[in-house]
Image (cartoon, rainbow, N blue to C red):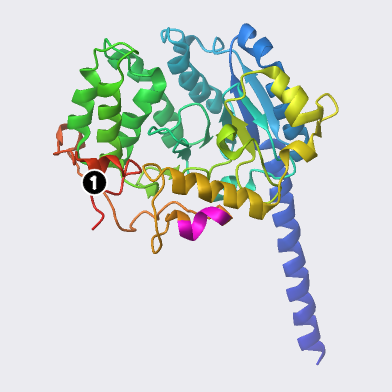
């Protein structure tokens, strides 16, 4: 009996030690291994001081670091004269100075925290080296807000993105936002890279004529396919479906948020008065204007579903698929497909020379979320 009792005591003590280690690891990660990063020059920082203050409040609440970078810190990045490309070089170099397990959430300056009680734990735990998202009511992958871990894979991804500065076409290409589509394609090595790259390099029109730019983006969406968690030998990249990342364009959700579901931050808040008069009751004291911003989860979910149903060119319609709006949007549970999950684009070893015939029809244009090439 004594022997059994001692074994039980040992098991309990072992379990407690394991639990304490988990708690310690969690606190360590939260306190020192997660950072919010905003990159902008001094004038940019002054312009978006209110938005940055909301991030500062959020960082203090959740014990995250907050880093404000000017994009002038690293000499290796000075050759990128365009700020948006230099930004990603700066983040790559910044990561080199952080612990190996460091996770950085990168933000545009026009981002305000709308649901400060919720942490970034869902996306931190997801653990991909690079996490991006499809922007709401735009065809592109979003360039300004993303999450990266301090790994060789993520740092290389960011540097390759910055180096598209040297590949820019003569016409409008939306700077880093146009380039990110190709960086993702070459990272996951899907067929069609040459076709889309040639379209990118041949962009000659000015911003007043975006037809060819959107044709190029359509090519990349056909190649990349639905939002997915990609696993490669050297690392991982996840592309999140619309409204499933921790940032979204708040205007499309009536600037509402919830403490349990949906995006935590709202992007596209340009006017500091919106931060201080709508989002926050007392920004210096980090007091959210809860009556204006917070809504029940059901109401926010119904708003998201109505948006998705109104724009089928951005959200899969119907039932029976993992990202079908009617099945998952009300609960904000439209998850990325797993790496091997169908419908899956074809990866090729010679992706840089691989071309394909674009599916270009009214039907495919209605499916810019990337399923039309494989969907039955």
**Magenta stretch bounds:** 326-330
In the image, residue 92 above or below residue 247: above
Which residue is more in the foreground, 229 or 100?
Answer: 229
Instruction: Name the residue tied to disc 1.
Output: 347
Quadrant the N terminus occupies? bottom right
Report which quarter residue 141 is drawn in.
Answer: top left
Which residue is more in the foreground, 84 or 65?
Answer: 84
Judge left or right: residue 139 versus residue 108.
Answer: left
Q: Position of residue 334 (x, y in %)?
A: 48, 53
User: How many numbered badges does the structure rendering display?
Assistant: 1
- Asked if residue 80 is among those painted magenta in the image, a careful observer would answer no
In the rendered image, the residue lying farthest to the bottom is 1
Residue at left offset 24%, top offset 52%? 374
Q: Position of residue 39 (x, y in %)?
A: 58, 19
Judge left or right: residue 16 versus residue 374.
Answer: right
In the image, residue 326 above or below residue 289: below
Would you say the magenta stretch is mainly helix, strand or loop?
helix
Residue at left offset 18%, top offset 38%? 358
In the image, residue 374 above or below residue 33: below
Quadrant the C terminus occupies? bottom left
In the image, residue 174 above or below residue 59: above
Q: Is residue 67 visible?
A: yes
Q: Residues within 10 Å of mark 1 (few under 14, many from 20)?
A: some
Judge left or right: residue 346 versus residue 149.
Answer: left
Report which quarter residue 60 is drawn in.
Answer: top right
Residue at left offset 53%, top offset 26%? 96
Which residue is more in the foreground, 96 or 144?
Answer: 144
Residue at left offset 79%, top offset 81%? 6
């Amino acid at each position: 009996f004594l022997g059994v009792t001692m074994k039980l005591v040992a098991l309990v003590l072992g379990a407690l030690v394991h639990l304490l280690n988990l708690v310690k690891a969690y606190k360590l990660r939260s306190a020192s291994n997660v950072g919010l990063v905003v990159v902008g020059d001094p004038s940019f920082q002054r312009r978006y001081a209110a938005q940055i203050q909301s991030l500062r409040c959020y960082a203090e609440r959740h014990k995250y670091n907050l880093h404000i970078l000017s994009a002038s810190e690293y000499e290796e990045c000075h050759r990128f004269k365009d700020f948006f490309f230099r930004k990603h070089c700066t983040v790559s170099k910044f990561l080199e100075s952080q612990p190996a397990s460091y996770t950085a959430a990168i933000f545009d300056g026009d981002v305000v925290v709308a649901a400060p009680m919720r942490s970034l734990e869902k996306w931190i735990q997801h653990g991909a080296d690079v996490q991006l998202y499809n922007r709401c009511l735009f065809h592109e992958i979003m360039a300004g807000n993303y999450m990266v871990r301090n790994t060789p894979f993520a740092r290389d991804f960011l540097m390759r993105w910055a180096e598209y500065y040297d590949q820019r076409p003569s016409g409008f290409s939306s700077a880093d936002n146009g380039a990110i589509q190709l960086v993702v394609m070459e990272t996951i090595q899907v067929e069609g890279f040459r076709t889309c790259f040639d379209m990118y390099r041949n962009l000659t029109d000015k911003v007043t004529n975006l037809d060819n730019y959107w044709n190029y983006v359509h090519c990349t969406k056909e190649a990349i396919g639905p939002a997915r968690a990609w696993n490669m030998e050297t690392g991982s990249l996840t592309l999140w479906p619309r409204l499933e990342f921790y940032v979204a364009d708040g205007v499309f959700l009536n600037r509402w948020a919830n403490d349990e579901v949906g995006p935590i931050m709202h992007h596209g808040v340009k006017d500091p008065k919106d931060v201080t008069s709508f989002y926050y009751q007392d920004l210096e004291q980090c007091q959210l204007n809860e009556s204006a911003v917070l809504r029940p989860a059901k109401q926010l979910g119904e708003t998201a579903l109505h948006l998705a149903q109104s724009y089928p060119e951005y959200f899969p319609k119907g039932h029976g698929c993992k990202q079908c709006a009617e099945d998952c949007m009300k609960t904000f549970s439209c998850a990325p497909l797993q790496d091997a999950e169908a419908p899956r684009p074809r990866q090729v070893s010679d992706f840089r020379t691989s071309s394909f015939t674009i599916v270009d029809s009214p039907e495919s244009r209605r499916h810019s979320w990337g399923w039309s090439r494989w969907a039955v």
